[in-house]
Image (spheres, grey):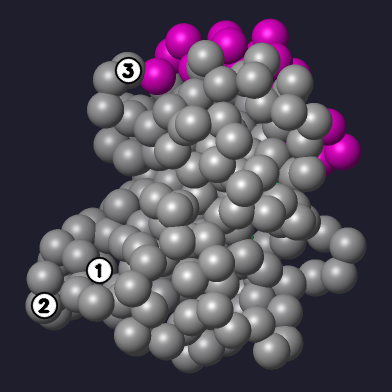
């Protein structure tokens, strides 16, 4: 990353319940992710997406997660979303075809060249870096080796994978990401967020934001 951002932003992912959406908004979370991959334990359908999205006020970003989705599904969801997040093998052209802002999730398998991926997905708004587990496109709850993220990466980084209230301070100090993304680390069960854990995560990010050096 060229400069450490003044504030690391927060995305909560895998929301399925209106009450969790309202709680996240009240806590000041910047972005909310909705999983539109039907095989996920956290999947929502288009009708539920519409219901959840209606709870989100201006200036909080509604993010839709897709895994090699049919274009028709993305088009149906798009009116309820501000940002598209692609977790599968989508090519840059497939990510761009909707004319919407998008981010690409990259799973940190061995040998992944982040500079090459950043050049390939240069039209993305950011790269979301997540743990790699074969056959699992996201939401693994696993941490990857953060030292693999080059400080010279020019795309904004959204750090994901196994983040919790306990490790998020260390993550922000070490990586200095544009944003952090959490799902399992604030859950009572898949798709059901835990109110105290959500608050603890936001608190720990605020502490880390106050105590780290910025250069940007
Ligand atoms: O959560 C899922 O089931 C899921 C399925 C398919 C694609 C993405 C999915 N989740 C993405 C996320 O929730 C997060 O962006 C990220 O993977 C972090 O999850 P976690 O390690 O549980 O914090």
User: Could you tell me residue 27's position as x and y percent?
Assistant: 31, 36
For the C terminus, the quadrant is bottom left
**Nearer-N-terminus badge (1/2):** 1
**Nearer-N-terminus badge (3/1):** 3
- Magenta stretch containing residue 53, yes or no? yes
Q: Helix, strand, or loop for circle 1? A: helix
Residue toward you, 81 or 183: 81
Residue toward you, 204 or 156: 156
User: Could you tell me residue 119's position as x and y percent?
Assistant: 48, 71
Ligand 1 contact, mark 2 (Cβ < 8 Å): no
Ligand 1 contact, mark 3 (Cβ < 8 Å): no
| Cα–Cα gap, marks 1 and 2 | 15 Å
* Magenta segment: 38-56
| Cα–Cα gap, marks 2 and 3 | 31 Å
Is there any visible trace of residue 162 in the rendered image?
Answer: no
What is the quadrant of residue 26 in the picture? top left
Q: Residue at x 63, y 39 (%)?
A: 65
User: Could you tell me residue 213's position as x and y percent?
Assistant: 13, 79
- Tell me the number on the disc at residue 215: 2
What is the quadrant of residue 22 in the picture? top left
**Nearer-N-terminus badge (2/3):** 3
User: Could you tell me residue 204's position as x and y percent?
Assistant: 32, 61
Cβ–Cβ below 8 Å for labels 1 and 2?
no
**Residue corresponding to mark 1:** 208
Q: Is residue 42 above or below residue 80?
A: below
């Amino acid at each position: 990353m060229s400069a450490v951002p003044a504030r690391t932003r927060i995305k909560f992912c895998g929301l399925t319940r209106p009450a969790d959406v309202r709680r996240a908004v009240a806590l000041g979370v910047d972005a909310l992710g909705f999983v539109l991959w039907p095989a996920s334990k956290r999947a929502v359908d288009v009708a539920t997406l519409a219901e959840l999205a209606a709870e989100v006020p201006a200036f909080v970003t509604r993010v839709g997660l897709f895994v090699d989705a049919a274009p028709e599904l993305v088009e149906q969801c798009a009116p309820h979303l501000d940002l598209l997040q692609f977790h599968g093998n989508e090519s840059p052209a497939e990510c761009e075809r909707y004319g919407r802002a998008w981010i690409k999730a990259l799973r940190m398998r061995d040998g992944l060249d982040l500079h090459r991926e950043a050049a390939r997905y240069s039209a993305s708004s950011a790269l979301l870096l997540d743990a790699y587990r074969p056959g699992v496109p996201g939401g693994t709850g696993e941490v990857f080796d953060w030292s693999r993220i080059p400080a010279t990466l020019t795309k904004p980084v959204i750090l994901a994978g196994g983040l919790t209230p306990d490790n998020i301070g260390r993550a922000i100090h070490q990586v200095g990401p544009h944003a952090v993304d959490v799902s399992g680390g604030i859950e009572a069960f898949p798709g059901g967020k835990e109110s105290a854990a959500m608050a603890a995560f936001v608190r720990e990010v605020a502490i880390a934001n106050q105590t780290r050096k910025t250069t940007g």
